Every structure is written in structure tokens, then in C-alpha cells.
Amino acid sequence: MQGLKAAHRRNLKRIIAFSTLFCVVLTSCSPERVLLPPGDVVSSITPNAPTAVSQPAPAGTLIGPVNGGQTPNVAPYDQGYVSPEVPEPAREKQQTQVAGLISKPSFLGGPNRAETACQRQLKRLGVRFEVLAPIVGKGACGIAAPVKVSALSGGIDIKPDATLNCPMALAFAKWVKNELANAARVRYLSGIKSIHQMSAYSCRTINSKAGARLSEHARGNAIDIGKINLNNGKTIVVRRPGIFAFREKSLLHSVRAESCKYFTTVLGPGSDRYHKDHFHFDLRQRKTSYRHCSL
């Protein structure tokens, strides 16, 4: 009888212990405890205290560790940040310009000290010109620091305006002032009103022949002169003068001979069939000091 009572007491203790454990588990799994975010100790300790509301971080602010992507569940940057977008047309234009410059030769570096000094000399000579942006043509065509010349010393107009590199513009301006203008005054007792240029910068080969070497015109390093208009109304056309055109013949021969002091290449009527109606002047750089002056 005593053994039965002892077993009954043990069973009763087990029931009480199990009931107590069940109540504890049930209490810890209440909806409030389940919905409470982990780590929110403020609400669990002081349920009546107001919960602080955090302000959103400014756009672009780091809100998580930057660890090379080792924590994929944490965004390294504020997902509300939107990078400024470049409009599609502008982006395409930028890509085109960059692609074009990459394929160009290294001479397109813009004006340097020599170019700046050259432009100062043009101003001192009284040359009227405009500094242009670098010209990028096809292949190796182009001018790093081009100038567009509209008038020379003494108010001599260039028609149409001539786009050249600065050294070529300077050599041409000196030749006109020191040789051509003086020769016209001596032989015609008149100053020069305008000079008609037939070609300055032009992206082409020599004499525009397919497969030929690139012309000096393609670098703004040459100019072709077809007509010279004087203040007295006389127009001198560059061509082989007639038998009795003594003054014109003398003028053309004189300025052509003197031009070799300013240019490395001089061509004109009698040189070949390509230059029968104009003077061609350029500053082609050769390995030697040779100057090609076809007279």
C-alpha cells in the first residue's frame, strides 16, 4: 500500500513539472513575442516607452559594409540612389568623338608654346585670323592648332578665308608682305586689294590621285594662289604670261623666285600640268635641307 502511494506521488510530480514546462513554452511563443523583431530590446524592456524612428540615410550614403560582395544580404549602397544618366544622343556623340580621337595620330595635342608664339607673330604682322578647334579628318588628315586667315598685313583680304596651320600661315603672310606687295607696287604702282586662294586645308592626296602620298594640304601645310587683285582694278591671273605681258611676266617670275626663301616647295605654271594655273606653296619637312623650287 505504501509503495502504491509513493508511485502515485511520483506521477503527480511529473504531471506538475510537465504542465509547468508547457506553460513556459506557451508564454514564450505568444504573438507579441513572435512578431517582435530580434534585438529590439527597447520594446521588450520598456513596453510603454515610445520607439525612436530612424531617419532615412541621404542618397548615396553607405548603409552597409563594403566587403567585396562577401555578404550578399547587405546592400553596400543606398538602393534609393540613382546615378545621373547621360542622354543617349549625348552618350553616342561622346563615344563617336572618343573613337575618332583614338584612331588619330599623336599630333592632335592642341596648341603648344611654339603655336602660341606663332600666333603672337601673326598678330604683330597685322594678320586677321581666328583660332579654330583641332581639326580631325579621315586617316592622318587634320590640324592640331588651326588658324583661319581672313586678311594679311596692309588689309589684303584672303578670299575665301584660308584654314592653315600657324607656321604655314606665318610664312605666307611674310612672303606677301616682303615680296608680293613690294613687287606689285614697283611694277603696277598699286597695292594689293585681295588674293584669291584655290586651296588651303583639304584632306586629299597629292594632285588628288588615288593611291598617292598624302598632300601637304591634308595637314594645313600648303596653300594654292590663283589670282591677285590690285587696288587699281588690275587682276593678275597666275598662268604662263603671253609674249608681250612684260610686267606680269616680271612680277610672277620675281615673286616665284623669292618665295623659295619662305617655303620648302614652290610649284607653278611650267612645273607640270597640275599647276598650270596657280602657285603652290608648302612647308613639307624633308630629311635633308633640300627645297623643291620649280622655276
Image (spheres, rainbow, N blue to C red):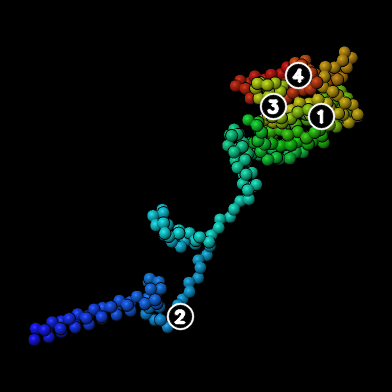
Tell me what residue is drawn at x 38 percent, y 71 percent: 38
- C-alpha distance separating marks 3 and 4: 14 Å
Image height check: is 231 above or below 14?
above
**Viewer can see residue 126:** no
Q: Is residue 33 left or right of residue 154?
A: left
Dot 1: what SS?
strand
The answer to which of marks 2 and 4 sits earlier in the sequence is 2
Q: Are marks 3 and 4 in contact (CB under 8 Å)?
A: no
Q: Quadrant of the C terminus?
A: top right
Of badges 2 and 3, the one in the foreground is 2
Quarter containing the N terminus? bottom left
Residues under numbered marks 2 and 3 in contact, where contact means CB atoms less than 8 Å apart = no
In whole angstroms, how far apart are the C-alphas of marks 2 and 1? 89 Å
Q: Which residue type carries mark 4?
A: Tyr
Q: Which residue is mark 3?
A: 204
On screen, 234 above or below 56?
above
Residue that badge 1 annotates: 196
Amino acid on which disc 2 is placed = Pro
Image location of residue 284, percent across then percent down:
66, 25
Q: Nearer the viewer, mark 2 or mark 4?
A: 2
Question: Residue visible at 61% across and 37% down?
Answer: 100
Q: Secondary structure at mark 3?
A: loop
Q: In this figure, which residue is indicated by the disc labeled 2?
A: 50
Q: Earlier along the polypeptide chain: callout 2 or callout 3?
A: 2
